[in-house]
């Protein structure tokens, strides 16, 4: 049996671009979740409380869309928190590419939610609702840099 040597180490890393784009993605998600409803024809309607309106009409939607509708009110807040926690300067246990396991986990989780949302959104114009999560997902994928001492 051989001994496996890991390339993982603990270093201080940060991602300024990831933080800025991640927060921007959270703001875009909040805009679509809380203030705007997109009609099947592609018109944007000002609807304060849009996520709560969608939850109130949960019985009128197919059961396949229920998970994305249930996550919608909370997603912008989670996106902003993850962008901050995964991008600010901190000691992280990282591999060669400076990606931490929590960041990889959040990328995978957000990609799963994005895929579910895109596949269950009824019309192409309504896909714009997922723009903020896409921006946050890309922000988390931006490379980190080691902090200089």
Image (cartoon, rainbow, N blue to C red):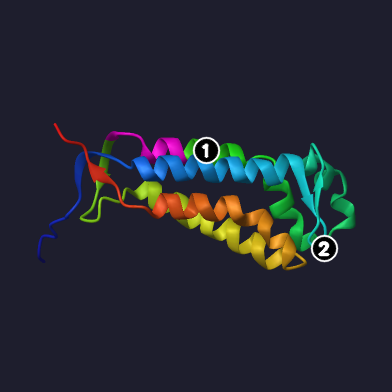
Picture coordinates of residue 106, whole percent (x, y): 46, 49
Residue 63 location, x and y as percent?
Answer: 80, 60
Check disc 2 and report the residue beneath it.
40
Residue 94 coordinates in the image, percent (x, y): 25, 48
Disc 2 and disc 1 in contact, CB within 8 angstroms: no
Extreme residue in the left direction: 2
Which secondary structure dominates the residues rendered in magenta? Answer: helix
For mark 2, give the secondary structure: loop
Q: Quadrant of the N terminus?
A: bottom left
Residue depicted at x 23% and y 53%: 95
Image coords of residue 146 (percent x, y):
21, 42
As measured in the structure, the alpha-carbon distance from the residue carrying label 2 to the one carrying label 1 is: 28 Å
Q: Which residues are magenta?
A: 83-90
Q: Is residue 114 found left or right of 142 in the rendered image? A: right
Is the C terminus in the top left, top right, bottom left or bottom right quadrant? top left
Q: How many marks?
A: 2
Q: Badge 1, how many Cα within 10 Å: few under 14, some, many 20+? A: many
Identify whether 74 is placed above or below 115: above
47 above or below 5?
above
Q: Residue at x 35, y 35 (%)?
A: 88
- Residue beneath label 1, please? 80
Q: Tag on residue 36? A: none
Q: Quadrant of residue 130?
A: bottom right
Q: Does 57 appear in magenta?
A: no
């Amino acid at each position: 049996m051989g001994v496996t040597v890991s390339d993982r180490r603990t270093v201080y890393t940060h991602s300024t671009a990831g933080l800025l784009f991640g927060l921007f993605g959270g703001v875009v998600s909040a805009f679509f979740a809380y203030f705007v409803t997109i009609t099947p024809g592609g018109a944007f309607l000002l609807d304060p409380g849009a996520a709560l309106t969608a939850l109130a009409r949960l019985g009128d939607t197919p059961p396949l869309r229920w998970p994305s509708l249930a996550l919608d009110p909370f997603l912008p807040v989670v996106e902003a928190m993850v962008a901050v926690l995964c991008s600010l300067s901190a000691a992280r246990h990282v591999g060669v590419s400076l990606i931490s396991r929590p960041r990889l986990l959040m990328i995978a989780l957000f990609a799963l939610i994005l895929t579910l949302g895109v596949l269950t959104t009824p019309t192409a114009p309504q896909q714009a609702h997922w723009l903020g999560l896409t921006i946050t997902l890309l922000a988390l994928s931006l490379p980190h840099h080691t902090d200089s001492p």
